[in-house]
Image (spheres, rainbow, N blue to C red):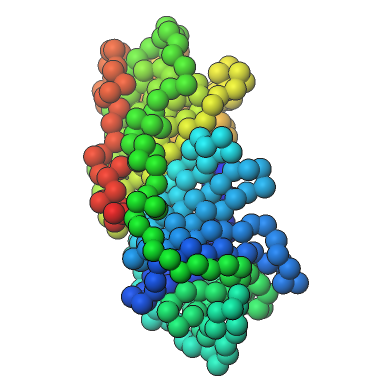
Amino acid sequence: MKTAAISGAIACLALAGSAAAQAGRDAAPDYVATMQALDRDGRPADPAVTVVHHDGMFLTETRLRDGQASIGFGPDRNAPVLRWSRRPDGEVTLMELLMPARKPDAADRTRPLDASSIVAGQTCRWRETADALRPREQSCVTGDGIVAETKLLSDKDVALYHSRLASLERRAVTLEDMRPPPEILTADFWLRPASIRAADPARPDYEITLEGAGQSGLRLLRHYPWSYREQRDTDGAITVRIWNEREDRGILYRQGRDDRHLRASRRAPSSSDLDATTGRVSLGKGDTVLGETCEWFDPAPAGHDGANRQCLTKDGLPLKEDAAGRTADRSYTATSLRRRPVDPQEMRLPPEAFSPAAWGLP
């Protein structure tokens, strides 16, 4: 899945660290602030980030040079977070929900520094958060819990990111002022095709079950251009991918024992997208599974499902797969195969995938 636009949210991710410091202080008032990024010489640089706070919830918006906006919504970096990208015409094209594995509270590793500053007319005191897995963060925090300046420092004290308060308005904010567009928290928004085309007889519908070692397995559905891939791992984690191969859009959802991640993409396809080929490369060998012959292919970088190799029938049905996992490679072999009409409505995510409550969002 293409995530280039989401990468523009780096400034928001850095700011989230500062937001965490604020979220831990009950006294923080409602406010609207602008945080300005600074270069190594302390001069204003792109981007500026708007921060809205209400009752421990933050809405951040970063305007990018190409006119797009990267927006974040959530309580702090240790809690569920929602991010989305918006084009200049208002169209939302990318979204990410992330619930990382819980870590010890960063507040336990925060120590005050013997320094204070006045930033945009606000008096603040400096403190530092040390984390072995992250760069050091220094924040200057006002008496009522608002971060006025923040720095991410390397182990050589080089500023990796530096932002400073440019404006601040303490005023009432409601949750309704901050809520994300409701449609982006529905699967239908991301799975609605840009165009409707007749079925391709060269790509028949199918349902396939493949099994691997232990309790791992795959369930695959296809109703071209839509494909569904459900992967269950031995540790109980489940990964579901619903994808439109013609338009390069869809949803990837993973749920583990203590983490959860959803990423969705929706963009207008170009003519080159509609005619894109797989780019796969034959490995020059075959197999026989369930009485059917298949040929081994390397999907190459065009493969979105993480597979290194697949053994495909002449009409493109995968009967074997060697896949690269997070900790080890896995092999799967088909145990059932049905060429049958598949209704796209069969391609469903777990009900909690788009439930705000499941992500800890109001």
Q: Is residue 171 above or below residue 325?
A: below
Q: Is residue 153 above or below residue 312?
A: below
- Identified at 35% across, 45% down, the residue is 254
The part of the image, by quadrant, that contains residue 106 is bottom left
Q: Which is nearer the eye, 37 or 321?
A: 37
- Identified at 43% across, 77% down, the residue is 145
The part of the image, by quadrant, that contains residue 19 is bottom left
Relative placement, left or right, of 355 versus 70 is: left
Residue 308 seen from this side: no
Q: Position of residue 186 (x, y in %)?
A: 33, 36
Q: Is residue 71 above or below residue 314?
A: below
- Identified at 38% across, 12% down, the residue is 204
Residue 23 seen from this side: yes
- Identified at 39% across, 42% down, the residue is 181
Q: Position of residue 356 (x, y in %)?
A: 29, 48
Residue ranking furthest to the front: 171
**The C terminus lies in quadrant:** bottom left
